[in-house]
Amino acid sequence: MALAACGASRGASTRFSPWLRLAFHRWVLRPSSGGPLPPPESEKEKVVRIPRAWQLRLERGSFRRRGRGAPAADIPRTGKLLLRSRRPELSQAARHTVGRWEQPPLVSAGWKHRLSRGDYFQLQRMRQEAPQERNPDAADAAPSSFQALGVQPQLASILEDVLSISKPTAVQIRAIPPLLTGCNALCAAETGSGKTLAYLLPLIQRLLQSPALTYGAAAIPAPRSLVVLPSRELAGQVRRVASYLCTPLDLQVTDIGGGRGKHSVQQKLRAGPADLLVATPGALYKALQRKGLSLEKLCCLVLDEVDTLLDPTFVDLVEDVLRHAFFATSPEELGDVWNPKAQLVAVGATLPKGLGDLLSKVTDLSSFNVLTSFSLHRLQPHVEQKFVRLKGADKVVELLQLMKDRGPSSGAVLIFCNKASTVNWLGYILDDHKIKHLRLQGQMPALERAGIFDTFQKGQFDILVCTDIASRGLDTTHVELVVNYDFPATLHDYLHRVGRIGRTGSKFPGTAVSFVTHKWDVDLVRKIETAARKRTPLPGMEPVVKEALSKKKKP
């Protein structure tokens, strides 16, 4: 009977679901030992599986439910930082090094997404002094005075008495001796390193050693030396520095610029034989076309801020000016009184593409001596630089907050915009908030534009809203803060803008704040951040002229 009942029960269990059958086998049909029967072989093979993505999602959910959050990131140890981020895991310690072929994690990697607005990172100040005051290539017995470099005692004495400068910078130590020999040269060094005196002192000394020129009233004015600069403000600044040095030596300095009228330029040129002429490309080109100026008697021609002079706006004018002069291919050709030839010097904070092609049209490239500094095309380690990801509508609020945070003893401020219309619009905003400032942009009338930068330099106004016209070569030792309201279009422009602070003789260490709003801005920021983390020059700015010269020398 028991067996029959058991058989009936087994037959009845087949009419139920597999789960009920499993329960029936385990709890109804018990073995004699009292334990549950093992499941059928077919039931052992059945395994419940879920997709891997579901499993990870469930695991993340369990972390949040337990209050743990995501797994903790590797936060750098405490100590001095090279790069400080709002997210500590992306900060980089000063002692940390990144391999040449290694791609470091970037704060700006996700800045093209709209949710990244409000993020920022900051390059910390690694030094208290400018790098050009530290000469790593020089030996312990490096020259410590201008006379040791070959500058005449009389000129060195005037430099110390008038400008209170007695010790040369690293760039001047490297550039002055070769320039005194008369060789053609390309001099490239970081902004604020003393490049102006590096070429002015050899130029003035050559004027003292060469005979003065005399010509009649009907003769065409022919200066003995020429310095070409891209803007009137920069030309006026170089003229003042040159006048301080030349006036005690009875040398005449003249400057001409655009926007002053034809008769004004002619009067300046005919006022007397100019030993040194400082000019902008436009005014110089017009004077040459009108036969009001001759460059046949030049002993030296300097192209200052050469990267700007090779801009499409100026390059054709500069090429025409160079074709009016005769250049030496060796220092021996400079001493010929009957057939005078000029020394050609190109100076800038960057060596742009196309410079070699331009110079090869007027002289032999193999005659050039390339002089570059170690810090060329590198970020300034003594300047604090902050990058803030913002929505365009939030830039005004952020700027006003920066202006309100300034203390009574703070230095001057430069606010850079990409367009003249933005300069005017931002000026109206500052006027509405009762913030005194000056504006400087290239579309201003000449009379209105004249004297604006001089007023700013004298400290009568502490804030200057400007375009890139104020980013090239102008001496701004009293500036403490640079604000890139519009992020610059190129890495060259960024270096020039930030180069307005942390200069030789600056009164403040300097800070730069850049607002990043557009996706194309993020591309440049990523290059800057990568170069900062790797401690390398900015990409795409290598001195291509040096390669062109080396190729030219090969047979």
Image (cartoon, helix red, strand yellow):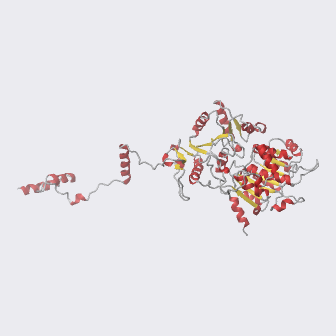
In the current view of this chain or complex, which residue is farthest to the left?
A: 1
Give the quarter of the image for residue 44: bottom left
Residue 253 visible? The answer is no
Residue 547 visible? The answer is yes
Seen from the viewer's position, the closer of residues 381 and 290 is: 381
Residue 207 relative to residue 53: left or right? right
Question: Measured from the top left, where is residue 343 in percent x and y?
Answer: 80, 57
Seen from the viewer's position, the closer of residues 83 and 351 is: 83
Give the quarter of the image for residue 506: top right
In the current view of this chain or complex, which residue is farthest to the front?
A: 141
Question: Measured from the top left, where is residue 436 in percent x and y?
Answer: 68, 32
**Residue at x-position 65% and y-position 53%:** 377
The image shows residue 331, relative to residue 461, as above or below, that is: below
The image shows residue 502, relative to residue 185, as above or below, that is: above
Residue 426 relative to residue 255: left or right? left
Seen from the viewer's position, the closer of residues 444 and 146 is: 146
Q: Quadrant of the C terminus?
A: bottom right
Q: Quadrant of the N terminus?
A: bottom left
Question: Measured from the top left, where is residue 477 in percent x and y?
Answer: 69, 42
Question: Measured from the top left, where is residue 75 in percent x and y?
Answer: 47, 48
In the current view of this chain or complex, which residue is farthest to the bottom?
A: 555
**Residue at x-position 68% and y-position 35%:** 462
